[in-house]
Image: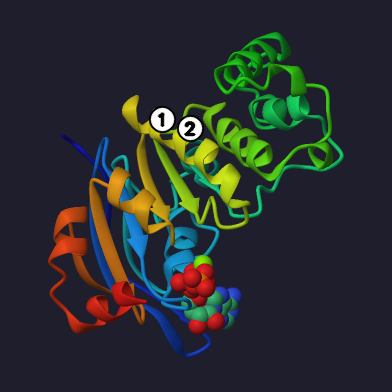
Amino acid sequence: MENILTVKNLVMKFKNKAVLKNIDLTVKKGEIIFIIGPSGCGKSTFLRCLNRLLIPTRGEIIFEGQDLKAKKTNINLIRQKMGMVFQSYNLFPHLTVLENLTLAPLKLHLMTKEEANTKAIDLLKSIALENKKKVYPNSLSGGEKQRIAIIRSMMIEPSLLLFDEPTSALDPAMVKEVTSLMESLGEKGMTMIIVSHEMNFVKEFATRVLFMKNGKILEEGTPKEIFNNPKCEDLKNFLSK
Ligand SMILES: Nc1ncnc2c1ncn2[C@@H]1O[C@H](COP(=O)(O)OP(=O)(O)OP(=O)(O)O)[C@@H](O)[C@H]1O
Ligand SMILES: [Mg+2]
């Protein structure tokens, strides 16, 4: 499979403190990569560098053949192809579900209003929430909000989805509805990079797991390798907690 993302020697410093220390990563189309590691090790910072919410201090990020640093690269086009889903949903409270879904494609002039509405309704049907199209986010459950945030990122047909702890704000009963939706995207071939503390989800769904500590990827492997046969002490300690 072809490479969709290549990260070389990525360094991110805040003030003078290095938070990402020479990260290298190659992601192939269709991979489902999980990043695990202790709080503060740099997982969110890494995702934010990938879609340029943060400008890395050093290093290279090549996404679908385009160098994110290059002057001619249009970062808005990159963000259309690289969706991001956050822990806290980030739906606009003053817009209905349908308006939340159609906002980006309309603003970016990617679709007519009719096309955007049709697509939004199709996606809502796929998660059995068509009846919520006219309500505002504050009347939805956490699981519903997060599933709508996920299908919102699908509106503009991204080729890579980034997730930062998508289930950690949810009641346990709602975790499954969100992980099921993510699994169905995976089955359709969506490439994903997911930060998660939900170890059962990682075990079942990852094609590859990266263990980060202190701004570095210390170990990587299949879920079997990482969970059944961890090599470094830091990973063994992390998993035993
Ligand atoms: N804007 C910022 N300015 C200064 N330091 C920051 C900034 N953002 C993050 N940091 C620091 O960078 C380090 C990594 O933070 P990051 O949020 O990436 O960790 P994380 O692995 O996502 O942790 P968690 O599991 O708690 O979400 C932390 O020490 C954090 O305090
Ligand atoms: Mg984080």
> Is residue 174 positioned above or below 135 on the image?
below
> Is residue 9 positioned above or below 1 on the image?
below
Spatial CA distance of label 1 from label 2 is: 6 Å
- In the image, is 130 to the left or to the right of 5? right
**For the point 16% across and 70% down, which residue is it?**
230
- In the image, is 7 to the left or to the right of 95? left
**Nearest the camera: 43 or 222?**
222
Q: How is the image coloured?
A: rainbow
Q: Nearer the viewer, mark 1 or mark 2?
A: 2
Which amino acid does the dot numbered 1 rest on? Leu
**For the point 48% across and 32% down, which residue is it?**
181
Q: Which residue is mark 2?
A: 181
- In the image, is 9 to the left or to the right of 91? left
Q: Quadrant of residue 189?
A: top left
Tell whether label 2 touches label 1 (CB within 8 Å). Answer: yes
Question: How far from the left and from the top, in percent, is residue 99?
Answer: 77, 27
Q: Which residue is mark 1?
A: 185
Crowding at mark 2 (Cα within 10 Å: few <14, some 14-19, many 20+): some
Which amino acid does the dot numbered 2 rest on? Leu
- For the N terminus, the image quarter is top left
Question: How far from the left and from the top, in percent, is residue 90?
Answer: 69, 48
- For the C terminus, the image quarter is bottom left
**For the point 27% across and 62% down, which residue is it?**
210
